[in-house]
Image: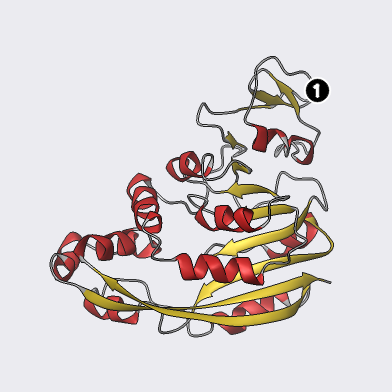
């Protein structure tokens, strides 16, 4: 492997696991570009992440405003109880962590703080989120690809896949996990942010069949090890409440006038989610 300019150490630790998303051949690092034998090339951005999108538009991804709102909100520590719950549920032996739809890298960074021997790779389609994720932790790399396609990774390169409020691709999760590897999924309960959704009717609701659909998707490939509820209350001022709305998929559906109830005052909001650990069959 030829290296003429340094790349971020966290990303360098994952280079042997990556493959070309077009032809599945090995990738070679030349200067700050990944290239395969078929001459497909993918540049490493100055911010430290690599884009492995193949030109087909990704089906999801935060825009700049959503990513900035997420970074601002999570930096307050408001969701620290959830970050702690993820770290408690994750296997302590995890060493290679793939964070799917990881956004700004907040939850991956919290996990890496608890696992000093682990390396992480956060995946997202938002350029702004990736800029945050690439510097979220000294052992966190960042890359971009569409999670609904075949991942540009070799088989069995991770021992933990993290999926927090993110799209799921169970077949690819299973493929890139080592035998006996784990998947950790966090998703909202029916009453998650209910008070906020009552004030802002345009916010997206929770699918009442979410748990059923999750198990239908995972059960052929994974065995559920443990499921824990995570519930806590927040007292949010106007700015934080708006950031919380703006960082969720609801931001694509809520008009400015629907945010008027959040312009002043403080409101109590309940975070209610479910976290589960699953072992690859």
Q: Tell me if 31 is positioned left or right of 57 in this view.
A: right
Residue carrying label 1:
1
- Identify the residue shown where x is 54% and y is 80%: 210
Q: Tell me if 152 is positioned left or right of 68 in this view.
A: right
- Of all residues, the one furthest to the top in this rendering is 4
Secondary structure, mark 1, is loop
- Identify the residue shown where x is 43% and y is 41%: 128
Q: Is residue 148 visible?
A: no
Quadrant where the N terminus lies? top right
Q: Is residue 82 visible?
A: yes
- Identify the residue shown where x is 46% and y is 43%: 132
Image location of residue 278, percent across then percent down? 72, 73
How many callouts does the rendering have? Answer: 1
Toward which corner of the image does residue 223 lie, by quadrant? bottom right
Q: Residues within 10 Å of mark 1 (few under 14, many from 20)?
A: few
Toward which corner of the image does residue 194 lie, by quadrant? bottom left
Q: Nearer the viewer, residue 208 or 44?
A: 44
Image location of residue 108, percent across then percent down? 58, 55
- Of all residues, the one furthest to the right in this rendering is 179
Image location of residue 55, percent across then percent down? 56, 37
């Amino acid at each position: 492997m030829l290296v003429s300019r340094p790349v971020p150490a966290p990303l360098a630790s994952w280079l042997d696991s990556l493959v070309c998303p077009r032809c599945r051949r090995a990738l070679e690092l030349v200067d700050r570009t990944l290239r395969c034998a078929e001459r497909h090339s993918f540049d490493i951005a100055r911010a430290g992440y690599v884009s492995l999108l193949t030109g087909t538009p990704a089906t999801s991804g935060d825009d700049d405003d959503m990513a900035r709102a997420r970074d601002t909100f999570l930096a307050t520590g408001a969701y620290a109880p959830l970050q702690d719950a993820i770290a408690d549920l994750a296997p302590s032996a995890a060493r290679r962590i793939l964070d799917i739809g990881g956004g700004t890298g907040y939850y991956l960074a919290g996990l890496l703080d608890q696992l000093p021997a682990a390396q992480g790779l956060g995946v997202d389609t938002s350029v702004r989120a990736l800029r945050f994720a690439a510097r979220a932790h000294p052992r966190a790399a960042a890359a971009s690809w569409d999670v609904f396609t075949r991942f540009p990774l070799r088989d069995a390169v991770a021992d933990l896949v993290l999926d927090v409020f993110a799209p799921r691709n169970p077949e690819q999760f299973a493929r890139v996990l080592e035998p006996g590897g784990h998947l950790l999924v966090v998703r909202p309960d029916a009453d998650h942010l209910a008070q906020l959704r009552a004030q802002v009717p345009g916010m997206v609701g929770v699918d009442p069949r979410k748990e059923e659909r999750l198990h239908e998707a995972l059960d052929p490939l994974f065995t559920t090890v443990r499921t824990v509820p995570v519930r806590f209350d927040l007292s949010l001022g106007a700015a934080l409440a708006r950031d919380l709305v703006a960082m969720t998929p609801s931001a694509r559906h809520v008009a400015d006038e629907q945010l008027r109830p959040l312009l002043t005052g403080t409101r109590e909001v309940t975070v209610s989610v479910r976290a589960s650990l699953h072992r690859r069959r």
